[in-house]
Image: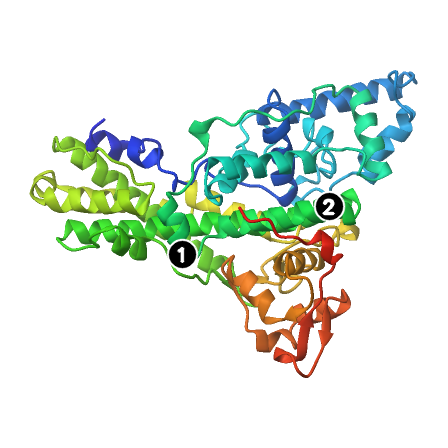
Amino acid sequence: MTLAEYRQAPWKNSHRVYKDSSLAISPAPEYASSEVLVASLYRIIGFESVSEGSVPQAGRDLEQRLQKRRDKRQRPPDGTTLGVEDWNAVLHGVLESPKLPNQSAKRFLQVTPLIPSLAHFSGSARLSSNSWPAGSFVRRMVWLGSRDHEAAQALWEDLFAALGVDGQDDVFARWLEQETAAWGNHTPWQLAPVPKSEVANLSNDDFDNVRFMPARQFVRDLHALIQAKQAMTRRQWTSLLEAVLRLAAVAHVTWLCDVQARTWRSLSEALAGGGPIGTDATRAAAFPDKAQYMTYGGKALHGLKDKASSYLSARLGINALLWSLSDASVPYPGDISSSEGIASLCQHIRDNRQALAEAGILAALADIREQEARALNCRKGIGANLLEFARHALGQRQTAIQLLRGYDQGYVLKKKGNSPSSPWVVSLGPVAVLALVHCALSGMGGPRSIHRLGQHLASYGIVVDRQDIARNDLGHQLRMLGLVLDSPDAESGMLLLPPFPANLATDKEE
């Protein structure tokens, strides 16, 4: 492919070097609630034969079979313990997950992803057959946040065991797993193979020296959550998992956007004859030491939109450069998955500046950006999808039925007012507070200053002034949940208390 061909469809024709990078945003995020993330994770980790596209139809098929039995007053399948009407009440009452306001007129089955078997027929991102595999994105995040393939595989197997239902789960979860299987979901729950082509790790040098990486914190938090599973019911544990997963996923996407924007800055400087030289300088330029993606109590989506827009601009620039090098018969032979690879590309650009100038790279870039101005402003395409993903993953569920508006308690963003136009502000729900306090204190063995929670939130790009915690809604939540001890000797007069027994909060390193 040539640069001219790339310009015809720049969002579909990424260069191989860019597409194969471990720092690429793949699969491209679209709409996904926290429950969609968990349901897709079930499918990707334990149901190899269940595709994302088959889920909506499986839900419709189950509804049709159930309605047929109700209409004809037939007996339930062999092996069930509930009658047809009772099972219908479980699916549409006990387990039902609220629909969004724009879904109120649509008929489809949507249940809480409490156990693996429910993911066969519920929890797809779309009601059509072209849903994106959100679970694959979580898997890539696990691998990128782990030191090497072996460490990631070990954590993946631990997560598979924790997501499964066994003798340590509560009675309701064990009964529900058996009942759901009896109603027609017979696909065995077994660890699915992980294609190495779909996962990647950072280089050892980058993993050891990159200071800020949400995926690495997510890996640590996963260990902490897995260790705490036996201290609570299945519903409580999946709620904590959802809360951490939704924050980590959006923080990771934003971090990748940030890294790509910084990488493009280095490459464009190299195109002008400057830019970082050597691996260490490139690492400092490409990877942030810390980041402020959101401020507690402040509006969130504008800042995320800026990061998404910068990523889109960087994506166009990096691909245009790579295609221009190929056009000039000096293709880049390396990768851009590490500081070393990015440094090598910077040097390759400096060495071939004349050839790039003759290829008209600057004029081509200007034309592409003008052509894609609406997409760069996140009004359509990939940018709009990224914002939709962040909004629905982080935001408190807006329900079609007002009585169920309190259903979602693991949110990170909530509406500041009751109006549909009210802004989304950063404010943790009680389940998210509980999950993050547990993860922050995991392995500590006792109370710690409130500063510890601030540090933990900062590892996901959320900035909170610990002096404000005592007065804002986060401090109120901590007190209501019994997670703080007011002490005049502690910073801000508050000490964090572990929510679960200390022997369950052991922190396993990746």
Q: Residue at x 13, y 33 (%)?
A: 330
290, 7: nearer the viewer: 290
Give neighbour class at mark 2: few <14, some 14-19, many 20+ (Cα, 10 Å): many
Q: Establish if 119 lies above or below 217.
A: above
* Residue 373 in view of the camera: no
Q: Which residue is mark 2?
A: 229
370, 114: nearer the viewer: 114
Q: Residue at x 72, y 52 (%)?
A: 504
Image location (x, y in percent) of residue 221: 60, 51
Q: Residue at x 30, y 31 (%)?
A: 16
* Residue 80 in view of the camera: yes
- Colour convention: rainbow
Instruction: Determine whether, in the image, residue 408 is placed left or right of residue 210.
Output: right
Q: Establish if 119 lies above or below 494.
A: above
Image location (x, y in percent) of residue 421: 58, 59
- Disc 2 residue type? Lys
Q: Residue placed farthest to the bottom in the image?
A: 488
Image location (x, y in percent) of residue 298: 54, 67
Q: Establish if 62 lies above or below 34.
A: above
Badge 1 marks a residue whose secondary structure is helix
Q: Which numbered tag is attached to residue 358?
A: none
Instruction: Determine whether, in the image, residue 87 is placed left or right of residue 135.
Output: right
**Label 1 – label 2 distance at C-alpha:** 37 Å
Q: Establish if 466 lies above or below 7.
A: below
Q: Which numbered tag is attached to residue 306?
A: 1
**Which of pointers 1 and 2 lies earlier in the amino acid sequence?**
2
Quadrant (top left/top right/bottom left/bottom right) for the N terminus:
top left
Badge 2 marks a residue whose secondary structure is helix
